[in-house]
Image (tube, rainbow, N blue to C red):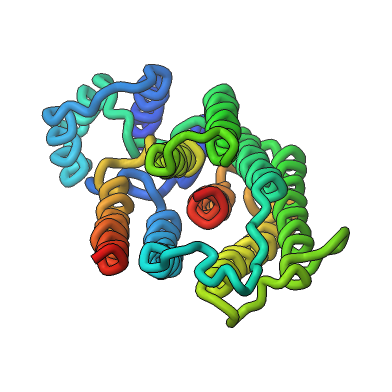
Amino acid sequence: MSATAEHADHHGPIAWPKDPQYGLATPGKIAMWLFLCSDAFSFAGLLLAYGILRGGSKHWPPDPSLKEPILGINFTAALTFLLICSSVTMVLAHAAAVEGNRKKTAQFLALTILGGILFLCGQYQEYWGIVGHGLLHEGLHFGASHYANTFYVTTSFHGMHVFSGVLYLTVILVRTLMGKYDHGKHDHIEIVGLFWHFVDLVWILVFTFIYLL
Amino acid sequence: MAQDKKGKSKAQKKSDDAEEKKTSAASEEAEEHAAAKEAHDDHADHAHAAKAHGDDHGDHEHKPNRKEYWVIFGLLLLLTVLEVGIAQPSLGISKTLMRLGLVSMALAKAVLVALFYMHLKHETRVLRLTVFIPLATPALYAVILISEAAWRLVR
């Protein structure tokens, strides 16, 4: 009886002792943060390369004679909005998980996954064009210039993160439906959230640096 | 001991209710002390006192605050609209000013996501520093290397 009372009272890992430095952050959470730091360095490397190449070019796009298309801002702004929304559904999924509401958690996780899939569709549209012409048909060819290369490498690397994030979220959704995260064991939902918010955070920077500047 | 734990979780709840409390150095020290010798009753009492004063960070799980999430969502949206707005070439503001504005707004958005959606605000100071200090290096690199590349161009 007293055990269930403690369950109701306590959210999160119960038996974990408090660390003097990291408090109650679980090893999984700390490890995700360390991974995200190293992942941030990967993106930082790509954005740095972009910054250096652009900073060292007189024009951007560097070769006007190639007639490379200017990146569309409005469509990508909509994609940014989509990712921000999916970040909100992610925190709401976590909030529902903390409250022990399995159904709501699963619904919000599904919405988050939907946001990720729509983002990937948007990126497909941008590259290849489902409606109208994609950048590839408009003359932005990989290998043609620094402009095209930095654009494709950075955005596709981010797209790969969205894709793996969707897979990761799907696994967590299935496990949620199996009831693995009931009774306060929702640590994994917060951790997948960290990854997903990171992907959103990186997109905020990519959007500004590659598209808006 | 079980009794003790229960009492503590109540104290934690109380400290959770009181939002935004500063970590005083004294209570932190007392806590570390207590964490090391938790078994000892005298010290456990000491920890109670420290928690009642409310070291709000990393102590216990933070309860998600939906209102806060929506406020942050509004801010992110507002900043995105502002960014797209000032990026329009028709506005005719100076390029330097526009770039400065865009970069600072993007960084502000990134920090908002990290602090609130990724709950860094509610983690311990050590975890926050573990994340923020390494990320200062690419920023430093960016300033040095990009200005170097630009300098070569105008030289």
Relative image position of residue A163 (x, y in whole percent): 67, 65
Query: Looking at the image, which residue is at 36% across and 68% down?
Result: A56
Query: Is residue A61 shown to the viewer in this render?
Result: yes
A204 or B94, nearer to the observer: B94
Residue drawn where x is 47% and y is 47% of the image:
A13
Which image quadrant for residue A172? bottom right
The N terminus of chain B lies in which quarter of the figure? top left
Q: Residue at x 63, y 50 (%)?
A: A181
**Residue placed most toward the observer, A159 or B143:** B143
- Count of marks overlaid on the render: 0
Q: Does residue A173 lie above or below A54 as drawn? A: above
Residue A59 locus on image (x, y percent)? 47, 63
Q: Residue at x 52, y 55 (%)?
A: A206
Q: Position of residue A164 (x, y in %)?
A: 63, 66
| A119 shown above or below B123 | below
Q: Is residue A7 visible?
A: no
Viewer-proximal residue among A121 and A67: A67
**Quadrant, the C terminus of chain B:** bottom left
Residue A32 % position (x, y)? 44, 59
Left or right for B149, reference A32? left
